[in-house]
Image: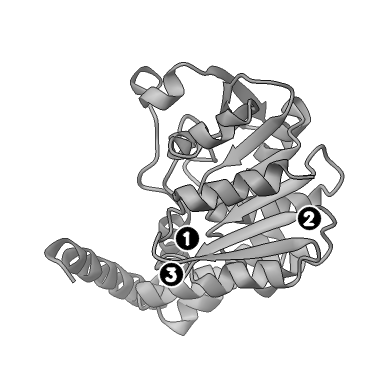
Amino acid sequence: MGLKEGIRFITLKSVGSYINILSYVRPQKALALSYALFSQPRIGRLQKDKLPKILQNTETETFHHNEHHFQTYVWKGNDTKILLVHGWESNASRWKKTLPYLQKSGSTIIAIDAPAHGQSSGKEFNVPLYAEFINKAVEKYQPTMIIGHSIGGAACVYHQYLFPNTSINKMVILGAPSDLKILIDNYVSMLSLNTKMFSLLESRFADRFNFKLEDFSGKKFASGFNIPGLVAHDTADNIVAIEEGKKIASNWRNSQFIETKGIGHGMHDDELYQKVIEFLFSE
């Protein structure tokens, strides 16, 4: 553990201790704080006048959805459309290395900014809201293919579960978590939160989204899928364990699983991209 990681570890543990103490005296405040830490990204925002180069020469569109708005970026090509869905503390520019491969196919590429990321609105990120954003973009652009990375992949899986009959007929999921419960467990252990905090968080999710933690599972969602899928995950992924990707693929009838070695959570790899292209463009 380097100095930076050491400091982060100490701050996380001390934030955790503070929340634990608070849970006895002011449980609602402790809950608000721990939920905010879990759901509010600290990086990944973009400013309109300082966009990364990759996003500068795109056609952009701002969608409005209830009190939210979200941003899309389009690289024009032919009538085949591919929608790209990024992960946590990231934004549409994360696809910079992926784009050249997809553009070789001549396709039109559309990338979306998640809630509270990029140029989209809000402070809080959550998968159900992301799935609604994805659905608005799918309705508008009618993509036939969708690629999701990390929690963006989880949002694609949830979207497909909620809206099985859209234009999408192929899906690629990279380094994605399956079970929300695992994410919460990891978060709780990272902060060393007490069991009281765990059950408070659990009921917060149940109240907020109207589902039990263990029901929010990519493995469960994928069991009803009919479209073909490619699920890829790296053995050295230290953000989301490879078991999570395997879970999603295990229940998905028409899917293939690719295990990569040593490319980590980012999943940027020439060989992998070749396989993604083959999957998307083979009959």
Q: Nearer the viewer, residue 187 or 278?
A: 278
* SS assignment at label 2: helix
Q: Residues within 10 Å of mark 3 (few under 14, many from 20)?
A: some
Report the quarter where the N terminus lies. Answer: bottom left
Disc 2: which residue = 161
Q: Residue at x 58, y 35 (%)?
A: 102
Which picture quadrant has residue 73? top right
The Cα–Cα distance between marks 3 and 2, rounded to whole angstroms, is: 25 Å
Q: Is residue 141 left or right of residue 176?
A: right
**Disc 3 target residue:** 187
Q: Amino acid at mark 3?
A: Tyr
Badge 3 marks a residue whose secondary structure is helix
Quarter of the picture containing the C terminus is top right
Name the kind of residue labelled 1 in the image: Tyr
**Which residue occupies the extreme bottom position in the image?**
195
Q: Residue at x 42, y 63 (%)?
A: 34
In the rendered image, which residue does mark 1 sit on? Answer: 35
Residues at discs 3 and 2 in contact (Cβ within 8 Å): no
Q: Earlier in the sequence, mark 3 or mark 1?
A: 1
Mark 2 residue type: Tyr
Q: CA distance from mark 1 to mark 2?
A: 25 Å
Residue 189 against residue 80 in the figure, above or below: below
Please tell me whether mark 1 or mark 2 is closer to you in this view.
2
Where residue 69 appears, as percent x and y from the top left, is: 59, 29
